[in-house]
Image (spheres, rainbow, N blue to C red):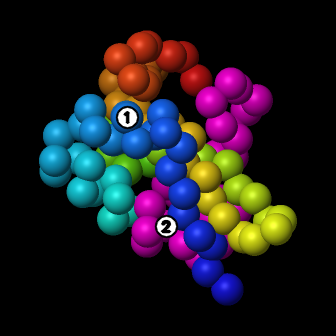
Amino acid sequence: MAFEIEYSPDAEDHLRALKARQRSTVLDEVDIQLTHQPDIETRNRKPMRPNPVAPWELRVGDLRVYYDIAYEPAKRVLVRAVGIKTGNTVRIGGEEMKL
């Protein structure tokens, strides 16, 4: 059974701040990568150390998608934030974060 994808209001704001091409790339990759087995670590998907954003990260080029997984009452992925990584810094919603 496929996971349902939900975007938090903050993540929707982060997506709006991206260029149209970046936004399209992120939405496509989220559908491809997170609909089935979002809790399996891959080359572009990994669990993160404890942080205030989310427990999982999806890499899409220089873009990062931070998400959480819920199994009850239904299987779903909640995208919490979308950022742009430059060097060791990620910009999420205009703020620099070290993750």
- In primary-sequence order, the first of circles 1 and 2 is 1
Task: Inspect the image, locate mark 1, and give the three-letter code of the amino acid beneath it.
Answer: His
**Residue lying at the far left of the rendered structure:** 20
Q: Which mark is residue 14?
A: 1
Categorize mark 2 by other alpha carbons within 10 Å: few (<14), some (14-19), many (20+).
some
Residue 93 in view, yes or no: yes
Residue at image x 54%, y 63%? Answer: 5
How far separated are the C-alphas under marks 1 and 2? 19 Å
Please report contact status of discs 1 and 2: CB closer than 8 Å, yes or no.
Answer: no
Task: Inspect the image, locate mark 2, and give the three-letter code of the amino acid beneath it.
Answer: Gln
Q: Quadrant of the C terminus?
A: top right
**Residue lying at the far right of the rendered structure:** 72
Q: Quadrant of the N terminus?
A: bottom right
Residue at image x 27%, y 56%? Answer: 25
> According to the image, label 2 marks what residue?
33
Q: SS class of the residue under badge 2?
A: helix
Residue at image x 66%, y 65%? Answer: 76
Is residue 93 shown in magenta? no
Position of residue 92 measured from the top left corner of the image (x, y, whole percent): 42, 25
Position of residue 13 measured from the top left corner of the image (x, y, whole percent): 37, 35
Q: Which residues are magenta?
A: 30-58
